[in-house]
Image (cartoon, grey):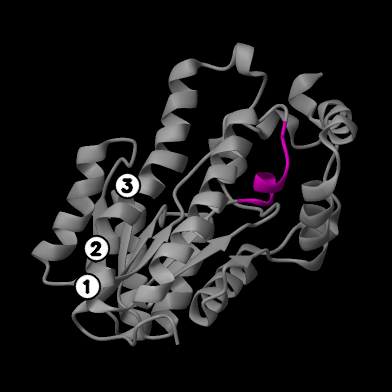
Amino acid sequence: MPIPLPAPDRTCIVTGASSGIGTEIARVLAARGHGVTLVARRLDRLETLAGQLASAHGIRAEVVVADLTEPAQRRAVLEAVEARSLTPEVLVNNAGYSTVGPVAEIDPGREIGMLRTNVEAVDHLCGLVAPGMVERGRGAILNVASTASYQPLPGQAGYAGSKAFVRTYSESLAGELGPHGVTVTTLCPGPVRTEFGHASGMDDFTDANPLPEAMWVPVEDVGRIAVDALEDGRLVCIPGPLNRLVAAVANVTPRQVLLPVLVRRHPSLR
């Protein structure tokens, strides 16, 4: 089993744990006996979740408040884990968001903040935990990308690009760490009903060009599927059969054919 066995001095770091997919992944890990270190910016939500998990499953649930756009705060996450005499056996890089709209109209500061969260933080945190995992000869990393990583996405160009980085980086990292007993899994969800859309500023577009209901996977299912994939040491996991099909087709469709269709369908480009 790629995930190291639970122990009182071992923990699973989960970023973006205050809502959505991050919360559900933390719930599943805790239900399977793993201690968790919950990372996000909202202390109240983290403390509530930590209390629930510790009470329900008898595991050690720690809280670290951090803004992952800041390199010093990323390092502080690992320092906090070490200070609590815990070993990070699992890292779940789930924190992330999207900007929406034409690049020419997006606030550059928000765009950079997204890239620091979606790209820099993933790379940085993996770099911080990988040496210890390699030295111990065990460990598991789950990086959350998106089905958007398989195609261009006009109207969310920076987001799609950031998730393409996560998927390619994770696959490359898997090749490097695999010989040392460390697995790297990439989760590529399609649409999931969470706070993601609201946080990304997509509320104005929710009724335009709705995606087929079959593409929507319940967040609880995504959390379970993600941890199953992590336990199996799978390279890539796409929840939902229709999402797997759409990603496969988009990945091989010529861009000169795909791009005009995507431009017409994205509501922010109208």
Residue 189: x and y in percent read: 65, 57
Query: Is 4 above or below relative to 151?
Result: below
Q: In this view, does 187 lie to the left or right of 184?
A: right
Task: Identify the residue at image location x=83%, y=30%.
Answer: 259
Measured as percent of width and height from the top left, residue 69 is found at: 34, 36
Q: Mark 1 points at which residue?
A: 135
Q: Mark 3 points at which residue?
A: 124
Q: Image check: 134 left or right of 237?
A: left
Asked if the residue at tag 2 contacts the one at tag 1, i.e. Cβ–Cβ closer than 8 Å, the answer is yes
Query: From which residue to which does the magenta span run?
Result: 146-153
For the residues labelled 1 and 2, the Cα–Cα distance comes to 6 Å
Find out whether residue 141 is within the magenta segment: no
Q: Name the residue under label 2.
A: 131
For the residue pair 88 and 204, the one nearer the viewer reads as: 88
Amino acid type of the residue that numbered disc 1 sits on in the rendered structure? Glu
Q: Is mark 3 on a helix, strand or loop?
A: helix
Q: Can residue 182 be seen in this view?
A: no
Residue 152 colored magenta? yes
Residue that appears at 77% across and 54% down: 247
Query: Could you tell me the amino acid type at mark 3?
Result: His
Which secondary structure lies at badge 2?
helix
Front of the two marks 3 and 2: 2
